[in-house]
Amino acid sequence: MAPAAPRQGSAPTLKMALLLATLSMVSPLSIDSFYPSIPAIAADFNLSPWQVQQIITSYMMPFAVLTLVHGPLSDALGRRSLVIIGMLLYTLASVGCVVAPSFGLLLVARALQGMAAGIAPTIARAVVRDLYEGHNAQRLMSIMMMIFSLAPAIAPVLGGWLHVAFGWRSVFGFMVIMGLALATFAWFSLPETHPKAKRSEFHLGQLAKTTGRIMTSLDFMLLAMSAALCMGTIMIVIGSAPAIIVDRWHLGETQYFYLFGPIVSGFMISSFIASRMAGRVSRAAMLRFGNFLLSGAAIVLTLLLLWNDEMVVWPQQVLLFAMAFGAQFTFPILTLEMLDLQPRARGAAASVSSFVSLGGGALFMGVLAPALGGVLHRIAFAAAVAGAVGFLLWTIARRRKDAA
């Protein structure tokens, strides 16, 4: 029997924030935890740097595309059962990664992982707006992101120690355990937040029509692309992590915290401050501040590295912290503004939002990051451009809204 949903109008609880945040952690844990193993995987299967990078792309692209289906399905079938099924499918795909005898089969298993992994984080966003309104929704989203932000810090450190102790396949074994644990957590703690009376008809044509309507909404897509670009600034850095850590900073497999620590600290502190400011400071003011910090820090990092490409690490870490702080300040606000545009199809809206963000993330991590070669001044410049364009798109969307 499913647990009862929170009372309408009640404040978000830590338990609900923890549940939704851990469900959203699936993707960063699935990507970041095996970074320390990339050289070993390349050596085992005799791969070039570009080829081994496709372990990320093979996961990210199905993850992004299938999110277009997950949200509309939850609008028609409900949220809870789909999350549980998704985590069980993710677990089976992770078993495939553990036992894959060839690189081709590893890529297939990773693609299956990506197809299933998008269910939980996509539906978690819809659950927020099912349960809460206004500043309560913004506060829960910020608390979720604060807890969620632990994942990129934990993942490479845990993955590095697992790799050193047991080899690269043990990292995927960790994902098996994680999938089972999250399916169990959802079974006992996730209520059904989208009752049958509110569900849309399960009709593929209608679901496709709803998704198409959202994807052709200029106002929605301006916000979606703005969110993708702002978070993409950090995705470029994360996608370049092995090159930055090993080749540029000359660190080892268990020292990824030097890069992920500042980023995650920026995420967590930003989320905490944003949760306290919700309802007290306007979304627009918070978004302007976040983007100014993001783009400004990226520009300063670019200029410093052009002046001295061999500068000590800690100033780079400070500026990466500021970039992450700014990106995290913007993303939850943009997500809520997108969901507010589609109150009758929040699952589909969450799907399209996730698709755009993840599709952009896949391009940033799987295509742009390898092309930049781990050269930090190029990465920082690309981040500055992405942040500025993201802010421009939000500004256009806001002016359209004010003029309507």
Image (tube, helix red, strand yellow):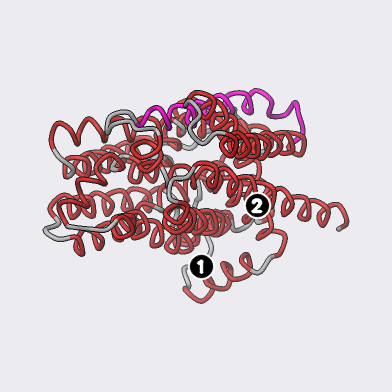
- Quick one: SS at disc 2? helix
The amino acid type found where label 1 is placed reads: Glu
Disc number lying in front (1 or 2)? 2
271 within the magenta span: yes
**Along the line of sight, the residue nearer the viewer: 235 or 177:** 235
Report which quarter residue 281 is drawn in: top right
* Residue highlighted by disc 2: 226
- Quick one: SS at disc 1? loop
Report which quarter residue 327 is drawn in: top right
At 56% from the left edge and 24% from the top edge, which residue is drawn? 269
Other-residue count near label 2 (Cα within 10 Å), few / some / many at <14 / 14–19 / ≥20: many
* Residue highlighted by disc 1: 201
- For marks 1 and 2 on the same chain, the one whose residue lies earlier in the sequence: 1
162 within the magenta span: no
* The residue positioned farthest toward the right in the image shown: 403
Q: Is residue 180 left or right of residue 251?
A: left
Whole-Å distance between the Cαs marked 1 and 2? 31 Å
Q: Is residue 9 above or below residue 117?
A: above
**Along the line of sight, the residue nearer the viewer: 169 or 16:** 169
Q: Position of residue 186 (x, y in %)?
A: 35, 40
For the N terminus, the image quarter is top left
At 47% from the left edge and 49% from the top edge, which residue is drawn? 123
